[in-house]
Image (cartoon, grey):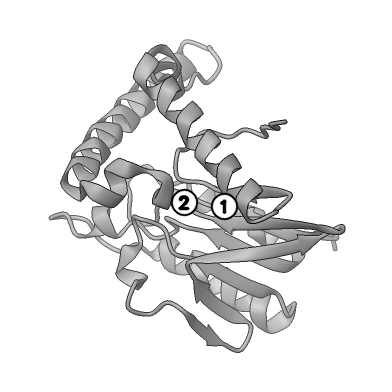
Amino acid sequence: MKLRKYYPTIVLSDIHLGSEHSRTEEVTNFLKHVNCDRLILNGDIIDGWQLQKSGRRWKQQHTDFFKVLMKMMEKQGTEIVYIRGNHDDFLDNLVPFTFSNLSVVKDYILNTHGKRYLVTHGDIFDTVTTNMRWLAMLGDMGYTFLLWLNRIYNQRREKAGKPYFSLSQHVKHKVKSAVSYISDFEKELVKLAEAKKLDGIICGHIHQAANVRYG
């Protein structure tokens, strides 16, 4: 029997269950092969915006994802922290909620290796999401289209024997306003970390993986 890889804490975000482009099966398979003391689901795990659209259905693979979470809680004793994101804002009326080793919160302080980190989805620093939800949803439609285009584009690349290329990330880097937005977003996070005397902030929301150090 193959041993599961152990991590004290695992943080996942922006899985977007309910979206056509969610990598649900990959994430579920990953969780089946690891053990952890704490699993932090850092927002936008369920995409309520997409599920509200006509024709969108909850699929078996989405249920399978939560079955794995339940097994982790029951058999491994994993603590699961679900942080509300903007796409799962339907949880607003539930937060904060705690039952057994499951908690649903707006943010979370992670203490590890003598350091303190704020884990938050990050949408509170996005003025479009917080102040102009209609514009955020319009942007979500555009991003969904870009992901669809990305899938078609890479299917053709695969047939041609070419490696995967993230069209969506390429567009983000090319558009100056997007690059500026990410930079401003990170600076706001740094200000909060300094104000709260934290060692760092772990967030999602902008779909841009990075480990950035300031100061």
Q: Which residue is mark 1?
A: 27
Q: Is residue 187 left or right of residue 201?
A: left
Q: Residues within 10 Å of mark 1 (few under 14, many from 20)?
A: few
Quarter holding the N terminus?
bottom right
Where is residue 52? Give x, y as percent. Answer: 19, 59
User: Could you tell me how far apart the alpha carbons at marks 2 and 1 are, in whole angstroms?
Assistant: 8 Å
Amino acid on which the number 2 mark rests in the picture? Ile
Looking at the image, which residue is at 34% across and 55% down? 87
Amino acid on which the number 1 mark rests in the picture? Val
Pick out the residue farthest to the front. 195
Vertical arrangement, residue 204 with respect to residue 89, above or below: above
Q: Are marks 2 and 1 in contact (CB under 8 Å)?
A: yes
Marker disc for residue 15: 2
Q: Is residue 202 visible?
A: no
Tag in front: 2 or 1: 2
Q: How many marks?
A: 2
Q: Is residue 131 left or right of residue 4?
A: left
